[in-house]
Image (tube, rainbow, N blue to C red):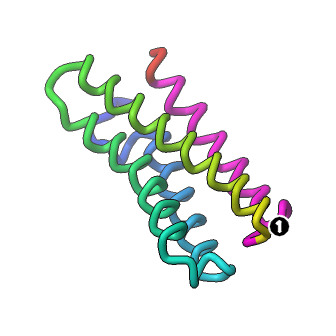
Amino acid sequence: MKIERFEDLNCWKEARILSKMIFKLAQNTKLEKDFGTRNQLTRAAISIMNNIAEGFGRYHHKEFIRFLDFSQSSASEVKSMLYLLEDIEYASYEELKLIHLQLDKTKNLTLGLIKY
């Protein structure tokens, strides 16, 4: 299958699912009332998918890889914040488990695309 749009990229599709999960978490936990932490987390999640899309739109292959790397960095930021949410009891391990799995899936697909 030829990739003609960023929407065709599996890593972007998975990042989109991840973003939705993060936004639902932000609406349904103690995080809802913590504007700063909520804003940081949701912006980082959005950055994962947006950097994939923005990189795809770049003319040079090296630029695309650079933006995929930015996406990976944002994914690491989200992962770190998920541990914080567990530590400060904004969400339980069980609530965060599926998000961690989705995040790892997204990161692995993005890393695979970088290596390709």
The magenta span reads 90-113
- Residue at point 56%, 56% (across, down): 18
Q: Toward the viewer: 105 or 9? A: 105
Pinpoint residue 72: horizontal percent, then vertical percent: 49, 35
Pinpoint residue 38: horizontal percent, then vertical percent: 52, 70
- Judge whether 30 appears above or below 14 on screen: below
Image quadrant assignment for residue 70: top left
- Is label 1 in a helix, a strand or a loop? loop
Q: Residues within 10 Å of mark 1 (few under 14, many from 20)?
A: some
Quadrant for the C terminus in the image: top left
Pinpoint residue 115: horizontal percent, then vertical percent: 48, 15
Q: Is residue 63 shown in magenta?
A: no
- Residue at point 54%, 45% (across, down): 77
Task: Read off the residue under disc 1.
Answer: 92
Q: Amino acid at mark 1?
A: Ser
Specify whether 57 is left or right of 66.
Answer: left
- Judge whether 69 appears above or below 25 on screen: above
